[in-house]
Image: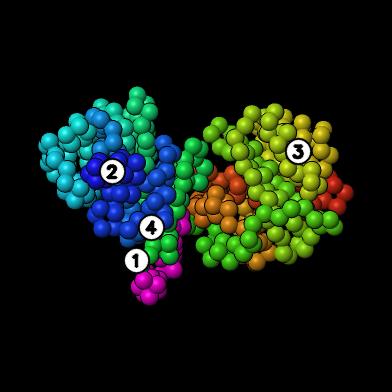
């Protein structure tokens, strides 16, 4: 009877795997292991125990599902083998009989398999899996991630991606910032009971602030070079969005989506021009009809002067907005007009005239924005595969605040239009 109760507890609760191995699950481990979500992103500090958690989840899935296939994928074979070793140690602690095993493979009596693979597309194709664990996922290439997802189609299986950050690049960062259908769990070093604060302060001094924030505080950091990191950090002092207040002067910028981009809207409180405040930032993907209605619902409470990206496909949207909201003006991007816009934003941040709240998408885009020399001069662009929609919406809002024509006339870059 006692063994039956123990088996039932194990079947119902994957944290039992940790407990029987002498590990007391931290709150974040309980949340991750008990999550029913089919898509789970775990962003965790170094030495948090993320690989231990992944191994417990892998073994539990193999135990409770007959003939399950569990794939453990890591950037290198050494890493995936280490993850398989953790699963093996848990199996030994639980007293499980393995039908077959090798350095990279375990097979249980019920026919379930746990297979460890390096992140090489040629080695993973052909599998159908009930659970795929991507360890150190931020280092796994985009094409490998694209090859993994179809493996879960027939089984309606589960995808769990675990990593520390690795800059504002790659699929893991994009899914964390903008992906849909994911449950997200973030674990900083200060959420990990066994990490001594004195050790963490020693690491901060040894690694430097930038690397410590990435490795232990789980911040996606990257310096594209266009906007200095220290300017972004100094500006990020506001707690969050603010509701409209009577007697305040607001401006807004709207960057419209193209292809796979996002539409982004930034609203600033520009009552004090030398102390502008970001009060609202939204972004979304939608058809033009829905976008127009959404913009109007967002801006009307603030009654801002609205500057709209009216380039190409954005021009019809601008015209529809203009008919419904008179205080709206166009700005058309080109190789001549985009650099002054970004330069104005850079100056506002450098001179301390703009305050932000910590929106992950915006901070990531600001840090990743690149400055490139072209035949026309300096060009500002997002890295390949990334976005700059929130940056451009913010830049439009700053331009609206600094270059508003007193008569309400159009906005122009002097000598360019």
Residue behind mark 3: 296
- Over which residues does the magenta segment extend? 196-221
C-alpha distance separating marks 2 and 1: 31 Å
- Observer able to see residue 334: no
Residue 2, x across and y down, in percent: 24, 46
Residue behind mark 1: 194
Residue in front for this viewpoint, 38 or 398: 38
Foreground disc of the pair 3, 4: 4
Q: Quadrant of residue 116?
A: top left
Residue pictured at 65% horizontal, 67% vertical: 351
Q: Are marks 1 and 4 in contact (CB under 8 Å)?
A: no
Q: Which mark is residue 26?
A: 4
- Colour scheme employed for the rendering of this structure: rainbow
C-alpha distance separating marks 1 and 4: 10 Å
Local secondary structure at mark 1: loop
Location of the C terminus (image quadrant)? top right
C-alpha distance separating marks 1 and 3: 50 Å
Q: Is residue 341 left or right of residue 123?
A: right
Residue 364, x across and y down, in percent: 52, 52
Residue pictured at 72% horizontal, 29% vertical: 316
Residue 138, x across and y down, in percent: 37, 48
Which circle's residue, 2 or 4, is located before the other in the chain? 2
Residue that extends furthest to the front in the rendered view of this protein: 1
Which circle's residue, 2 or 3, is located before the other in the chain? 2
Foreground disc of the pair 2, 4: 2
Residue pictured at 25% horizontal, 30% vertical: 66
Q: Which mark is residue 5?
A: 2
């Amino acid at each position: 009877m006692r063994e039956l109760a123990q088996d039932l507890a194990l079947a119902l609760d994957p944290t039992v795997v940790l407990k029987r191995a002498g590990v007391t699950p931290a709150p974040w481990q309980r949340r991750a292991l008990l999550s029913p979500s089919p898509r789970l992103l775990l962003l965790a500090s170094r030495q948090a125990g993320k690989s231990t958690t992944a191994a417990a989840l892998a073994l539990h899935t193999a135990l409770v599902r007959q003939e399950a296939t569990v794939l453990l994928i890591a950037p290198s074979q050494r890493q995936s083998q280490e993850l398989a070793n953790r699963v093996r140690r848990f199996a030994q602690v639980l007293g499980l009989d393995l039908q077959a095993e090798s350095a990279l493979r375990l097979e249980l009596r019920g026919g379930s398999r746990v297979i460890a693979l390096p992140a090489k597309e040629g080695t993973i194709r052909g599998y159908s899996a009930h659970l795929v664990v991507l360890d150190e996922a931020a280092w796994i290439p985009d094409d490998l991630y694209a090859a993994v997802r179809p493996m879960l189609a027939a089984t309606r299986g589960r995808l769990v991606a675990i990593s520390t950050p690795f800059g504002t690049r790659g699929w893991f960062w994009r899914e964390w910032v903008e992906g849909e259908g994911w449950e997200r769990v973030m674990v900083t070093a200060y959420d990990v009971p066994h990490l001594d604060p004195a050790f963490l302060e020693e690491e901060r001094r040894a690694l430097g602030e930038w690397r410590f924030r990435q490795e232990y505080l789980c911040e996606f950091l990257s310096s594209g070079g266009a906007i200095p990191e220290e300017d972004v950090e100094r500006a990020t002092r506001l707690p969050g969005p603010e509701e409209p207040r009577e007697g305040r002067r607001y401006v807004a910028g709207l960057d419209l989506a193209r292809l796979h981009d996002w539409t982004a809207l930034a609203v600033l409180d520009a009552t004090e021009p030398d102390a502008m405040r970001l009060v609202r930032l939204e972004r979304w993907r939608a058809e033009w009809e829905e976008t127009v209605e959404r913009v109007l619902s967002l801006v009307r409470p603030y009654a801002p002067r609205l500057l709209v990206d009216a380039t190409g496909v954005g021009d019809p949207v601008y015209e529809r907005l203009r008919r419904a909201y008179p205080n709206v003006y166009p700005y058309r991007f080109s190789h001549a007009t985009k650099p002054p816009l970004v330069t104005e934003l850079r100056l506002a941040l450098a001179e301390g005239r703009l305050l932000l709240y910590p929106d992950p998408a915006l901070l990531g885009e600001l840090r990743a924005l690149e400055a490139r020399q072209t035949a026309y001069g300096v060009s500002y662009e997002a890295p390949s595969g990334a976005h700059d929609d929130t940056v451009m919406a913010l830049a439009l809002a700053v331009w609206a605040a600094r270059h508003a024509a007193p008569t309400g006339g159009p906005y122009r870059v002097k000598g360019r239009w």
